[in-house]
Structures are given as C-alpha cells and as structure tokens.
Image (cartoon, helix red, strand yellow):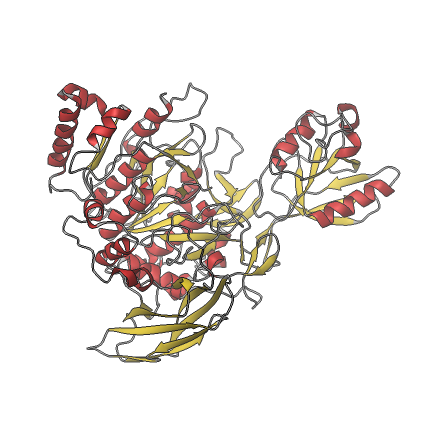
Amino acid sequence: MGDKIYHNPETTKKYHHKMLTSLLGSKEDAKTSLLYSYKHGFSGFAARMTKSQAEDIAKFPEVVSVIPNGIHKLHTTRSWDFIGVHHSSAEIVFDESNSGGGTIIGVIDTGIWPESASFNDEAMGNIPSRWKGVCQVGENFNSTSCNKKIIGARWFLKGINDHTKKLILGNNGTSEYLSARDAIGHGTHTASTAAGYFVENANYKGLASGLARGGAPLAHLAIYKVCWDVPVGHCSDADILKAFDMAIHDGVDVLTVSLGIDIPVFSYVDHRDTIAIGSFHATSKGITVVCSGGNSGPISQTVTNTAPWLITVAATTIDRTFPTAITLGNNLTLWGESVDNGKHNLGFVGLTYSERIARDQSDDLAKDCQSGSLNKTKAAGKIVLCFSISDQQDIVSAALTVKKAGGIGLIYAQRHEDGLRECSILPCIKVDYEVGTQLLTYIRRARFPAARLSLPKTVIGKWISPRVASFSSRGPSTMSPTVLKPDIAAPGVDILAAFPPKKTKTSSGFTILSGTSMSCPHVAGIAALIKSKHPTWSPAAIRSALVTTASQIGIDGSLISEEGSTSKAADPFDIGGGHVDPNKAINSGLIYNITTEDYIQFLCSMGHNTASIRKVTKTTTSCSKQKSKTLINLNLPSISIPNLKRDTTVTRAVTNVGNINVVYEAIVRTPYGTKMKVEPQILRFNSDTKVLTFNVSFISTQKLHGGYRFGSITWTDGEHLVRIPIAVRTIQFES
C-alpha cells in the first residue's frame, strides 16, 4: 500500500484491519485472516484470502498491488587478513571506526546460535540509545540469549507456515526451533563473518586454524530469522517484508541479506521482489542494504538483487587452499583438494576406476558413481575414481554410492568448481580432469593399482588470488541494464566462520562454507566500518566508497581472473568495481551520492506510472518530464550503456569528502569501439565548492552489432584513485 499514511503504527494497523473487515464482512474474520501488518517503514499487510477476495481488494483505490506469497532461497579467518583488515588479536586497543563500534548490523537470515564464542560481548560498548528492538523469546531462546553483541532477535514464520500449510516444529522431520535460534547454520555463519568477535585458534577439524573475527568485531548484531528448514533455507515474501519493516523500526545501520530469487523477472515496484521493495524503504531511512548476487555463475545475465539502491556482491577466492596428496603405488604423487579431515587408512590400498566395477556395463551410470551403479564385491575395500559427467551428480552423492558399495575412499574428477564440500562418511578428494586422467592412465597400466590418501593441509599464499568464483552470478542485469551489477566482489570461497555445533562433542563451533552468501556479510561488515567512521554518510555514499576504491589487481600483480568455462580477465559484469579494499574505502576522497528522489525518478524512467510509484514510495512524488535520460544519468559509481547507436552523453556529480582544497584530474580508459570524452577533465574543490558535475560523451565507431566492451574513468588528486567501471554495447541491428 506504499508509504505509510499515519505516523502512529497502531493507527496504521487499525486502518489495515478496517480494510480487511470491509472485504470479509466481520472483524473476527479480518483478525483471523491478517498475518502481518507492515506499519513502520511502509504500509501494507499480509493476509489469507481466496482468489476472488484478492481480486476484490485489488480494486480498492488505496491498494497498489495484491500478489501471492512467494518463496526466496538462501544464497549459500583468513579472508579479513587477505583483504587488508589486520586485527592481530583481541588484546590490542582499537580505534572504534576501525572495528565498527557503535554501529548495528541487522542480519535477515536463518537466525543465530547465541552461544558461539564469536558472539561474546566482553569488549562491547553499551547498546546505542537509539535502539528500539527486542529480544524475542521462543524455543531454546530466552532473554539471556541476547547480550551487548546480539542486542536484538526476532523471528517471523506466519508467511512460511501459511505457504507450506504446516507448522514448523522439531517433530516434523526438521531440527527447527520456534525461535530466533539457528537450526540451519547459515545465519550464524553470515552474522559472525560480518561482526563476530575474536576467537583464538578457530578451525574446522584442524583445518584453516587461526584467529577468527568479523569485519566489524565491535559492531552490534540484530537478528531477523525469516528462513526455515522446510525444506532447508526457504523464506517467504511475507516474512521477509516484515523483517525489513521491523529492522527499520528497530534502528539498524546496515542490513546483510544473503538470499534472493532464482531469476530476476519482477520489476522493482512489483511486490513479488520483496527484497527490492523492503530495501527501498530501508535505504530511504538511511540504512545500507547489502545483498548477495546469487550462485548461478558463470552464466551471464544471472545476477540477482539488482535494484540500484542495493549493494550487490559477487564472490571471489582467497589465498588459502586445502591441498591433499594422492600417492600412487609407483611413488608418483598427485594433488587434489579436500576438507575431509576424519579417519583415513593411511596405508596403500587398492585403487580402481568406477567403470571397471560397474554393476551393469551397458549403461554409463557408474562413470560418475550414480546411486546403486557399483559392484559391491569389486568396490569393497578400495579407493574409487569417478568422473563427473552430469549436473545431477556431485561429490557428496558419489561418496554415498562408494560407501554403500563398500569402498573406503573417493577421488572425484570434475571441471573446475570453486568451494569444497565435506563428504564425512569417507575421505573424498576433488581433482580436475587432468589429474583424473593421469590417475586413470596409472590404473590402466598398473598390474595392481594402489594409492594412499593423505590428510589435507592448510596452505596460505601459494595460489594466485583473488579469482572470481565459478558459481558467482554474472551481469549484466536483465531488469535494468543501465545499472551495472554486481557492484563489488568480496571473499566467498571456503570461508571459515561460526556454526551451530550440531549436537556433537567434537564440533569446533566453526565450519567452512562457500557462496555469495559468504561474500555479502564481508561487505556488510566493511559498510559498518565506514558508517562508524562517517556516521552522516548515506547508503549511496557508502556504496560509492566501496566501488570506487576497489582493486582490479590480484596478489601476483596481474588482472583478477574469473573462473568460467575458461579463465579470462574479470570484467565489470564479474566483479563490478573490483575486489573490495576496506582501508581505501574508508578514505575514498570523492563520492557519488544519490537521494531517494533520484531513485524515484529512475523508477519513472523505467516506465512505471506516477500513481503506482507514489504508493510504493512517497505519496507526493511526480515523475519528471525529462525521465528518458534518467536511466543512464542516475548518479551511480558506474556507467552502463546497453544500446549505444551513434552517440550519447552521461552526467555524473562527485562530492569531495577529502582535503578541502584539492584538484582532481581524469584518467580515461576508453571501451573498444567507442570514442569517449570527459568534460571538464579537471575538477577543483574548495571550501565553497564541494560538489562538481562532469559529462561523459560516447560516440560509436563500430559498424557492427556487438557485445559489451569495458573501460573506466579514474579521478586522481595524487593521493586518491577514484575509479568507476564503464560498460558499453553498440547497437547496429534492431528487429
């Protein structure tokens, strides 16, 4: 129903109830029907109703839209040292801005495991006086589960319960808790990545051992549980929207949201994209919202959470790996990767190829060790080599097949895919096709092929990094190609962070996970650092500081590469502005600022009418007559032109946040197939001139219809390098 009409939330709720009563005919039916009243950041409600009732209420003049409740999914240490946030121990005295002190990070996810050492509050400052949240009690979660680190916790399940038509209870095949307690582990992992306190000797079964901490270890956490184990990691629109509403009410500074829809097909004013709608209202209230870009890479046009007011994060590797030796009977040693650090038979045992021990030689099921495909007599007591040939099979499923057939180890050959998974039931090692082929050649030549599997090692600093993760979703955005997405890249592969102990005495309380879900809270933690240093900065200013100071260079001095079907230099559709650099972002020099009104005019330029935009955003908004240019002129820290026919000019404005009297000069890298000119090429700031505008003109020199080409503009004063990425596609053919 758009922006709230009444200042008092209870008046808004009564207004919703009155509307439902007029629809359903009685106050009692209205009370039973109503799931949530959204009454803090915006106005609306979730209610149970028939299709015909939904059609009737859609005709009410104050209703923007009525949509069915949908489902979103989760986008599922060393990383902080790797990106330059060096906190050597918990003993040192911090500059609060260097640790997020006084800021509040809201986590919309699966809840939290409050007993984790990462959420110790011994060094935390007092809870900010502006905080209005609560510690909502529930199953295995009481008021003492909150402290000065976890200052608030709420849980929302009316939407998911109504969608699944069953209550979420621990006795219905899930391990769920009717509370903010985390049964899945995803929320605990993301929360500790963003703002976990220091934990010495953190490790996962002896691997990745070291000091664990979040990016903003002195930031407070507010937990909003919206994702549930029905099945694992499902979250309903109604619950997500309520979490945004309450986070706005409670007073968070930053929101980290590691979930999204599979294919971005809904517009930003369509309530089926609840993350876009909820985050718009949060952003308009000064809250920085950081979202994961999705795990559908390396395919292009798969990036999600692409609204221009969001910070959308891609995932990269770090310089830590877990190499595992495979020693053959001929004393040749080959290397794979593993995180299976359990019991190994450290002696030599028989090694065989899965096709050799197939139950049925007439099919290909044994090639990648599909269920029931192996001969138990021939597999017993052996290490089995399998080759991945289908998307339906993975290393964990293959390990289960080998285990059931009596095998004692798995070597799984597959195309490059970032991120390691534990098989746990037996040692499993991931290798590439080259190593797999070498192993197969040995098996075929040896009379009695044998191998010994070693335990994995933790190795730091020996691999070129960062690389864009193979799974990280890629741009361009399909919904708004003039908005370059993702914005930024951050570590998201094999990240060690807090995790529920899963009722085992041997658990360290940490695990290793991969996904843009892991890269998202890295950026949220850095956003809290920036907010602590610059409390008056808008969400757009924080995003600008992150994007314009990001790096395009790996630790070896070469361009960051991306892992797709082949490896190539990463472009802005892989990493946006580049790999996040926290230390430079805090001192960015210039920022590209955007107001709520700017975002509204952007929505106008997308073709939405004034009436619908007014109800979703602000009731007094009117679309400008100059809306045709607003798409490319939204003051983003990037430029994307998806349809350059002959020529066009783009306008941007920069605000000086560094030295008062300073001169910046433009460094231009022109996309291939265009002529590009920046005017003026020199910007002079002083005490009276803090904001300056510049124009960028593009002229196509291409005679052919082509793909995107990339460039950049960097403003420098000799101290700062303020860079924005550019993507241009020449259009010479239109159907």
Q: Left or right of 501: which side holds 363?
A: right
Relative to residue 631, is residue 676 depicted above or below? below
> Which residue is depicted at the point 26% across and 77% down?
660
- Frontmost residue, 657 versus 90: 657
Give the percent coordinates (x, y) of residue 507: 52, 35
Give the percent coordinates (x, y) of residue 454: 70, 43
> Which residue is depicted at the point 72% across and 35% down?
367
Give the percent coordinates (x, y) of residue 365: 70, 31
> Which residue is depicted at the point 19% across and 41% down?
40
Q: How many marks?
A: 0
Give the percent coordinates (x, y) of residue 163: 35, 26
Q: Left or right of 683: which side holds 428?
A: right
Query: Where, by quadrant of the figure, is residue 352 drawn?
Result: top right
Q: Left or right of 526: which side holds 442?
A: right
> Which residue is depicted at the point 22% across and 40% down?
64
Query: Where, by quadrant of the figure, is residue 207 drawn?
Result: top right
Residue 507 in sight here: yes
